[in-house]
Amino acid sequence: MNYRHVFHAGNFADVHKHIVLLALLERLKRKPKPLFYLDTHAGRGWYDLLSHDALRGNEWQDGVGRALRITRASPDLRRYLDAVSSPEEISAITTQRYPGSPVLAARDLRPGDRIVLVEKQIAEAQALEQATRGRRGVSVVCGDGYAALKTYLPPRENRGLVLIDPPYESENEFTQVEKALLLGLSRWPNGMFALWYPIKLGRETQRLHLSLQNSGLRKLLLVELSVRPADSPLGLNGSGLIIANPPWQFDEEIAPALREAHAALTDDGAGGVNVQWLVPE
Ligand SMILES: C[S@@+](CC[C@H](N)C(=O)[O-])C[C@H]1O[C@@H](n2cnc3c(N)ncnc32)[C@H](O)[C@@H]1O
């Protein structure tokens, strides 16, 4: 596997995914009962945006770089902007490092909550270990995130979130994520799941949607943000999340934050935000 998230860290897809991640965790934290967070494809935790690799693609300039210029933000967007611009990340001059999903979640959760972070590549897992060292309740596992669904679900807390965010490097990753969601929900039917997928030219996204619509699953919400039309051949046109068992009224609540983010992430308003039920209750 060659994938290294540093090339993409902080890009528009990370902005989208991490706004939604923090919004979901915030809803879960509204109740005091402990919760469980599983990140099946966790990455290294922190990404150095001034590293050679990050600067090569410079994707973050059009992602978090643009987002940080937003001045007026609704609460779900503000939460994200604060999380990526706390003094830990930002020097006075420029964005230096970007927090991945494990760091965002680990910082966000409360004493008594439990976090399992799974990363397959040894070097990335070691970096993640470093990034989360000293945080109580956090375990880093170097292994296969899909297998972790069997190991860790259902969690004893019976409340929480599973993020499934693979690199889509292998041709069958769309099939694997679908199986993973089905497996996860069969083991933990009332768990909340967020499954990320790329929106590119091609039919994989529609196939995934259609297949899930025919799967018998209920309560699947689509939360997508695109910066180019779906038929653009340029590469990653949009970033998609399927949320299983979303919080009450999440569809209405998350849309304004994503529309504000979208306006900042594009010059010409191309693409857009799509929040709708793939399968309602
Ligand atoms: C898109 S990145 C994760 C980004 C991270 N979730 C975030 O939002 O900051 C995908 C990660 O999955 C890892 N990976 C690939 N296959 C895996 C597998 N089968 N199990 C666990 N991790 C895997 C890659 O090494 C990479 O670090």
Image (tube, grey):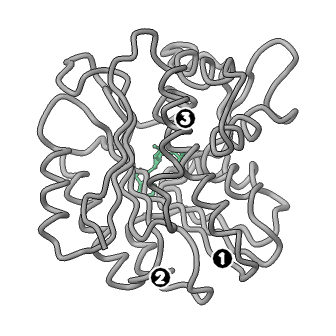
The percent coordinates of residue 86 (x first, y second) are: 83, 36
Q: Is residue 205 left or right of residue 238?
A: left
Q: Split into 4 quadrants, where in the image is the N terminus?
A: top left
Q: Residue at x 18, y 28 (%)?
A: 201
- Which callout, 2 or 3, points at the residue further toward the start of the chain? 3
Q: Which quadrant holds the C terminus?
A: bottom left
Residue highlighted by disc 1:
35
Residue 153 numbered tag: 2
Tell me the element at label 3: helix
- Choose mark 1 or mark 2, whichever is in front: 1
In-front residue for pair 23/127: 23
Residue toward you, 110 or 278: 278
SS of the residue under disc 2: loop
The residue depicted at 63 percent of the width and 19 percent of the height is 65
Residue 236, image quadrant: top left
Tell me the CA gap for discs 2 and 3.
Answer: 28 Å
Measured as percent of width and height from the top left, residue 48 is found at 68, 27
> Against 259, is 264 above or below?
above
Q: Residues within 10 Å of mark 1 (few under 14, many from 20)?
A: many
Residue type (three-letter) at the residue carrying disc 1: Leu
For the residue carrying disc 2, how many other residues have a C-alpha within 10 Å: few (<14), some (14-19), or many (20+)?
some
The spot of residue 228 in percent (x, y) is 31, 20
Q: Amino acid at mark 2?
A: Leu
Q: Nearer the viewer, residue 167 or 268?
A: 268
Return the residue at label 3.
15
The Cα atoms of the two marked residues, 1 and 2, are separated by 13 Å
Which amino acid type corresponds to the residue marked 3 in the rendered image? Val
1 or 3: tag closer to the N-terminus: 3
CB of residue at label 2: within 8 Å of ligand 1?
Answer: no
